[in-house]
Amino acid sequence: MTLALGCIADDYTGASDLANMLTRCGLRTVQTIGVPADSLQIPDVDAVVISLKSRSIEASQAVARSREADKWLRARGASHVLFKICSTFDSTDAGNIGPVMDALRADAGDAIVLVTPAFPGTGRTVYQGNLFVGNLPLNESPLKDHPLNPMHDANLVRVLARQSQSRVGLVDLATVAKGADAIRARLAELAKHGANAAIIDSVFDPELETIGEVALDHRLSVGASGMGLGLARGLVASGRVTAATASSDRKAIGGPVACLAGSCSQATLAQIAQAEKSMPVLRLDPEKIVKGEGETERALGWARDHLGKGPVLIASSSTPDQVSALQAKHGRDATGHAIEQTMAAISEGLVAAGLRRLVVAGGETSGAVVDRLGIPAFLVGPEIAAGVPVLRCVGWSKGDAVLALKSGNFGGPDFFNDAIRLMP
Ligand SMILES: Nc1ncnc2c1ncn2[C@@H]1O[C@H](COP(=O)(O)OP(=O)(O)OP(=O)(O)O)[C@@H](O)[C@H]1O
Ligand SMILES: O=C(O)[C@@H](O)C(=O)CO
C-alpha cells in the first residue's frame, strides 16, 4: 500500500469528520484508532487517518504520539501529512496544536507550514486571521464556555504564536483570491522574514482548493476538514489519485441501538432536548459520577428495561453554569475523566448485552468509549450530517458493528434520530 495522503487527528470524532470528507472527495480512506498494530489488515486505500486522543493531554505526550503516527504514515509512502485539528482551534496556551506542529514540521524539513481550521460547510471561516463560528467571532461563540479548552481569542495568529516556538504570519484573503502563485510568493516572503507557520484565510470551498494545491508542494499541513477537502481535491485534480465513489455498503446490523452524550456543547444540549420527544432519555447525575456513586449500574439497569422497545439515549451533559460549578468543586480534569470513564463503562456494558449500534456525542467521550471497546479501525459509510459519517468497524474482535462519533457542535436538531435512521 502506498498512501497518497497521511493524516493524524487529535481526537476520534475529528478523525471521522476528516475521513468522511476525504471519502466524499473520492479518496478511499480508513480511520484507525491509534497507530495500527502490524496484525491489522488494512484494505488498499489512498488515505489513512490515524485517530489520536491528543487534544487535551500533556503537550510532550501529544508530540511523542503524533511523531510516532507520522513515522508510520511516512513509512507507507505518505509524502504529505495533514495534522487534523478542530475547526474551532480547540487548544490552550500550553498546546497542543503549536507543539505538535513544530515537531512535525521539523521532522518533515519544511521551511513553513500552512495552517487553517476553516470548514465552510459547518460555518467555520477565517478572515484576517480571525476565526468565525457562524456569524460570531470564536471568543463570542459557545466555545468560550468549552469544559476543557475555553477559547477567548479569535485571532489565530496570536493564539498559535502563544503556544508555538514558530514565528507565525498571515496569508490574507486578498492574497488567496489572487491564486496559487500569489500564495506561494507570500509564503516565500514570510519564510524569508523568519516565519515557520502561516495562518491562511478562507471563507469558501474554492479557496480551500487553491490552498490544497499549494499545501501539496509541502510535506505537512495543519487544518480541519476544509484543508482535507483542499488536499483531496488537489490529489484528484493532479491525477495522483483516481477518484473512487463512496461505498454504498449498508448491510443491516440490527438489534438494539443506543446513544451516549458526554458533550456539553449548545448543539448537543439542544439535540438531547429534541430526542426527549421521541425516545427514553436517562440523564445521569454528574455529581454522583464524580463521587463514584453507582451511576454505571443505574444506567445499565435502566437500559435493560428500555432497549428491547426501541432506541435510548443516556446523557451526562449539563449547562455551562452546572459544568463550571462541578469543575470548581472537583477539578476540571478529574471531573472530565470520571465522566468519560463512566460513559466508557456504560458502552462496555451495552456491548456485553449484545448492542452493536452505538451513537456517541463528544470527542473526548467518543475517545474513551472507542478505546474501552478496543475497536481498531473504521470504514466510512453514509453521511449523517456535515462532518459525521456512519462508521463500520474493521477488525473488531466482537465482529460487525456500526458507530457514529459526533463532534460536540455538529449535527442538526434531530441528530440522534437522523443517525439511527442511517444505522439499520
Ligand atoms: N455534566 C458535566 N459536567 C462537567 N463535565 C462534563 C459533564 N458531562 C460531560 N463532561 C465532560 O465534558 C467533556 C466534554 O468533552 P467532549 O470532547 O466529549 O465533548 P465536546 O468538547 O463538546 O466535543 P468535541 O470535542 O467533539 O467538540 C468531557 O471531558 C466530559 O466527560
Ligand atoms: O473540526 C471539527 O470541528 C471536528 O472535526 C472536531 O475535531 C471537533 O472535535
Image (cartoon, rainbow, N blue to C red):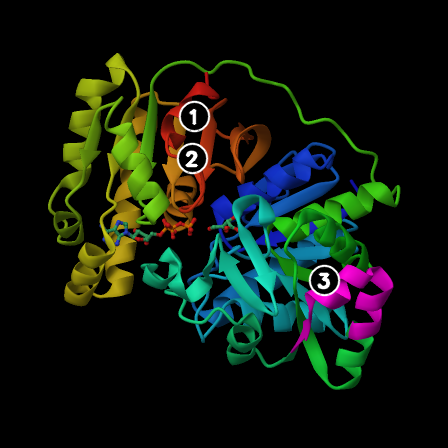
Distance from disc 2 to disc 1, alpha carbons, whole Å, reads 8 Å
Check whether the beta carbons of the residues at disc 2 and disc 1 lie within 8 A of each other: yes
Q: Residues within 10 Å of mark 1 (few under 14, many from 20)?
A: some
| Residue 215, quarter of picture | bottom right
Residue position for label 1: 418
Which mark sits nearer the N-terminus, 2 or 1? 2
Residue 285 higher or lower than 352, as above or below? below
Q: Which residues are magenta?
A: 169-186
- Asked which secondary structure carries label 3, the reply is strand
Residue position for label 3: 220
The answer to which of 30 and 273 lies nearer the viewer is 273
Residue position for label 2: 412
What amino acid type should be assigned to the residue bearing mark 3?
Leu
Residue 68 higher or lower than 188, as above or below? above
What main secondary structure does the magenta stretch of the protein show? helix
Give me the residue at 25% from left, 35% from top.
Answer: 273
Camera-near label (2 vs 1) is 2
